[in-house]
Image: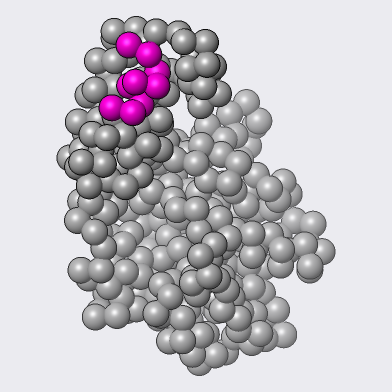
Amino acid sequence: MDVGTLLAAGAERLAAAGHPSGPADARLLLAHAWDRDGRGLDRARLLGEPVPDPVVTAFTGYLGRREHGEPVQYIVGTAPFRYSELTVGPGVFIPRPETELLVQAVLDWCAGEHLASPAIADLCAGSGAIALALAGELEAAAVTAVELSPAALEYTRRNLAAAFEGMGDSSVEIVAGDALTYAGGPFDAVVSNPPYVPAGRVTAEVAASDPALALFGGGEDGLDFPLRLIPRARTLLRPGGFFAMEHAEEQARAVADAYVSAGFVQVTTHADYTGRSRFTTGCAPV
């Protein structure tokens, strides 16, 4: 069977199961089944290279898993984030593209402050996506990744080991603990993508895959945890330090007010790729 026929059939099957991203999902799953990247898949399609039967069998199995709601990232075992591919699986939150903007905000602030070797804390680190992106793009940074979940910590450690393989000591310190009681620092910057989703506000697929500890912030509005995290972050920062936290669009006003109540200045709400208010930044007073 050829690549085009397989992809079309896979996309149609996933669409019938209610997955609008069927074409993209089918492409990722076939590339994984064939142990090729997207470019290799395109080359095989262009040359009319037949897909081996074992690959067809594996692809069919992956389609079945996706039909039943398993995330593509869990099936292939990785998720892209900025310039890296992170290992993910059951028990760890799948990093989303909009969180890349949270990283960029920290990078931009560090550049504006001309910090050669900033100390940065990533609270609720999950897979380590934010911490590893900052450590990779700020080579002299000292990054601390704080995560409570033992399951998520396994992925944090695995991704850290892969990122710094053969490079000697890592510039990321992993701390197993609760972000609300962590007492390190002082830090130049603190960043967090905390649990903030109100109960019942996610699809059944997301609720069945991403861990509840990383999703739900508590309370009807999902803000119990984030509103407690804001003053904690303030205590971790040096004077003039920077705090960036992700949240939902409808939480933007409450989050900004909480920043001000905690003593932050220069409080600013930022939009994601779709123009929705997605994260807020502020600075500790000097």
Q: Would you say 54 lies left or right of 243 here?
A: left
Asked whether 87 or 98 is in front, the reply is 98
Q: Would you say 110 lies left or right of 150 here?
A: right
Asked whether 56 or 149 is in front, the reply is 56
| Residue 76, x across and y down, in percent | 36, 31
Q: Residue at x 40, y 30 (%)?
A: 27
Judge whether 186 appears above or below 158 on screen.
below
Q: Is residue 114 visible?
A: yes
Judge whether 182 appears above or below 130 on screen.
below
What secondary structure characterizes most of the magenta part? helix
Q: Residue at x 40, y 80 (%)?
A: 251
Judge whether 27 appears above or below 111 on screen.
above
| Residue 184, x across and y down, in percent | 54, 65
Q: Is residue 70 visible?
A: no
Q: Quadrant of the N terminus?
A: top left
Q: Residue at x 37, y 13 (%)?
A: 2
Quadrant of the rendered image containing residue 117: bottom right
User: How many numbered markers are drawn?
Assistant: 0
Judge whether 169 appears above or below 233 on screen.
above
Q: Quadrant of the C terminus?
A: bottom right
| Residue 156, x across and y down, in percent | 44, 44
Colouring used for the render: one colour
Stretch in magenta: 1-9
